[in-house]
Image (cartoon, helix red, strand yellow):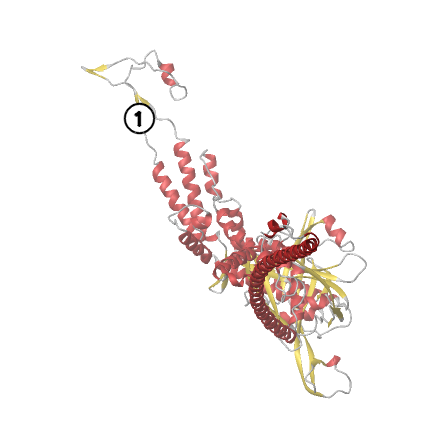
Amino acid sequence: MSDYATAQALLPGLPGAEAKRKTAPSKKDTEDFLATARARFDLVAVYEAEYRKIALDDVRFYDGDQWAQEIATHRKLDHRPCLTINRLPQFVHQVSNNLKQLKAAPKVSPVDAQGDTKTAEVMQGLLRHIETQSNADAARSYAAFYAAVCGRGWYRIVTKYVEGNTFDQEIYVQRIKNPQTVYMDPSCQQPDYSDAKYAFIVEDLTEDAYKERYPDEDLSSAEDYRSHGDGSPVWRWEGGVRIAEYFCRHTRQETIVMLQDGTVLPLKEAPEGVPVIRKRTVDVPYVEWSVINGEKVLEQAEWPGKYIPLIGVVGEEYDVDGKVSMVGMVRHAKDAQRMLNYWESAKTEIIALAPKAPFIVAEGQIENHEKEWAQANSKTFAYLQYKPKSVGQEMVPPPQRQVYEPPVQSITVAQMQTVDHLKATTGVYDASLGNRSNETTGVAIKARQLQGDVANYHFSDNLAIAITHETRVLIDLIPKIYDRPGRIIRIIGSDNTEKQIPVGMPFDDQGIQRLYDLGLGRYDVVADVGPSYKTKREESREGMLGFAQVAPELVPQYADLYVEAQDWPMADAIAERVRPPNIPPKGQEQLPPAAMQQISQLQQQNQQLNEALQQATEALNVQKIQMDASERMQARDIQSKMAMLEQKLASDQSRDSQKNRVTVATTESKVDSQESIAQLNAETRLVAEKMKQNGPVRPPLTAFERED
């Protein structure tokens, strides 16, 4: 579609042109395109003129310019104090810094049959990669700060080529330093500006920077683009020039068809000869990007996404009689801050700059001492002399000051009331500021802090809306930027673990064939803005510790998670050692449900076998104990019997020994007797023989003695 046709589609009533030109735009087309752009810019400038003026005043007031110019001039001319005690940054920082602590947690989900959860996880990890390399938190918090101060801030999404000899690109999230340089389509109805049809970003360049960027272009002298808060009053001034990025969103018609197998694709991509069962024409949105000055189109290209890549963060937005009002924290706190400045200046003026009270003296009382009394207000004297005077018969009292007590206490009370007004208008109370108040218990303090959070919840809610749209823009861009098959991309997990994978081509992942086609299927996103990962980890740690006190028997099932939540050195290594055996190591995918079921069944069988083995072991142990006891009893019985037997044997042996001794003795006695008888017989025979020979002979005495 030509430049002029693009403008004509958005601003009906201009001369028409064909839907698409294959040739370069003519001079008339370019002039019509620029005329449309200028008309749109003027429309935005006029529509937002009042807001831009007030928003600029909000920023200046926050910066400390808090006295009306005429009042400040009069007070300075009169040498009166004109103090600024700026309390607003304290209240604004309470909200803006709280928004900085909130981290986006986008959840990507497939919304059709072609999408899958694994690819959604890859896209979610790629989103974290884009956030990390872009320092997206800084861009968001900067925009949120302006939303808190003046009601609206902006940041943007850009693409850049990767360094080196490659055509690969990366997506970046960038801040917009001055939100007043953005001019958005005022016909937007969505709170995230997702339905915007056009937008501008103006930029001021020095002549040298302009010539370096566009060496073949002349400096423009147009003065058409101007509004409050966006810098210089003209497009061309001495030493500089203004250019503008112009985003224009429109649609082109495309025919889609449905094949017999239910596949839906553009008609130009349908295979020849395949029957088509349905066909219709759809409007396909796309965005045209241009860089223009007051009179020329300097650059022009088609943006790869279908959304204008500008993300707006709004403070509080409401409609007043057809005019949209965007309000931050400063707007309604201005009067209270002015009161504080006035009371502080008045108190200073009364106390520090008020003249000393004069002495009241009677005429002639300081005669000859005029010099000392003249210096009494500027010097310290040990004493002051005066002459006593009398009027009639009464003495006049000594000289004395006419004391005046300034109303400091009343002014202090008024100041305290003014500070209360600041708290009420900003929704930030003592508990949120860290000041002591009537709350004494932790519950009461937390309740008051919650009250302050609720009063300013719309800031975090609107930031969540902006981040959701930002993520939707990124999801739309990712398939078009990371589109080269085989490109290695980095994905980051929710716990900040990194992993590199190829996209657009199959690869082996631990024995499993995978293919992540980022351009296949449709995905939607919901961004949850909450505490950072570190804060969530601390809360998880406290929650797991409390749960362990309630159910200590379950601690082995999640001990590794509790260790991972710690800040110890080597916590990950310790977690790996205490990880339950049925949980895969960190970084490995969970097994399929069928495999997990089989493993669970095997584990149950193993547990049953272990229990049976334990029971059998216990039974064997009991049997062994019984056998050991029986054996010990038998051993003791045998020992007892053996002892008795040994005792009996000993007794028998003793009897046998005695018997043997008796027998031996008897035998010996018998032997001795037999020998004696034999000797006696021999002697008798000898005697008999002798008697025969000699007659009777008396026997020897010894024989009879031995017989006795």
Residue drawn at the location 73% of the way across and 74% of the way down? 20
Residue 351 higher or lower than 266, as above or below: above
Q: How many marks?
A: 1
Residue drawn at the location 77% of the way across and 87% of the way down? 273
* Residue 517 horizontal side relative to residue 415, left or right: right
Q: Which residue is mark 1?
A: 402
Q: Quadrant of residue 514?
A: bottom right
Residue type (three-letter) at the residue carrying disc 1: Gln
Residue 429 higher or lower than 481, as above or below: above
Depth check, front residue: 73 or 687: 687
* Residue 358 horizontal side relative to residue 431, left or right: left
* Residue 508 horizontal side relative to residue 456, left or right: right
Q: Is residue 202 visible?
A: no
Residue 567 in the image: x percent, y percent? Answer: 59, 51
Depth check, front residue: 635 or 13: 635
Residue 431 in the image: x percent, y percent? Answer: 43, 50
Give the residue furthest to the right: 165
Give the residue furthest to the left: 393
Quadrant into which the N terminus falls: bottom right
Q: Secondary structure at mark 1?
A: loop
* Residue 569 horizontal side relative to residue 397, left or right: right
Residue 622 higher or lower than 314, as above or below: below
Depth check, front residue: 497 or 458: 497
Q: Is residue 340 visible?
A: yes
Residue 597 in the image: x percent, y percent? Answer: 62, 75
Give the residue furthest to the top: 368
Give neighbour class at mark 1: few <14, some 14-19, many 20+ (Cα, 10 Å).
Answer: few
Q: Quadrant of residue 525?
A: bottom right
Residue 505 in the image: x percent, y percent? Answer: 76, 70
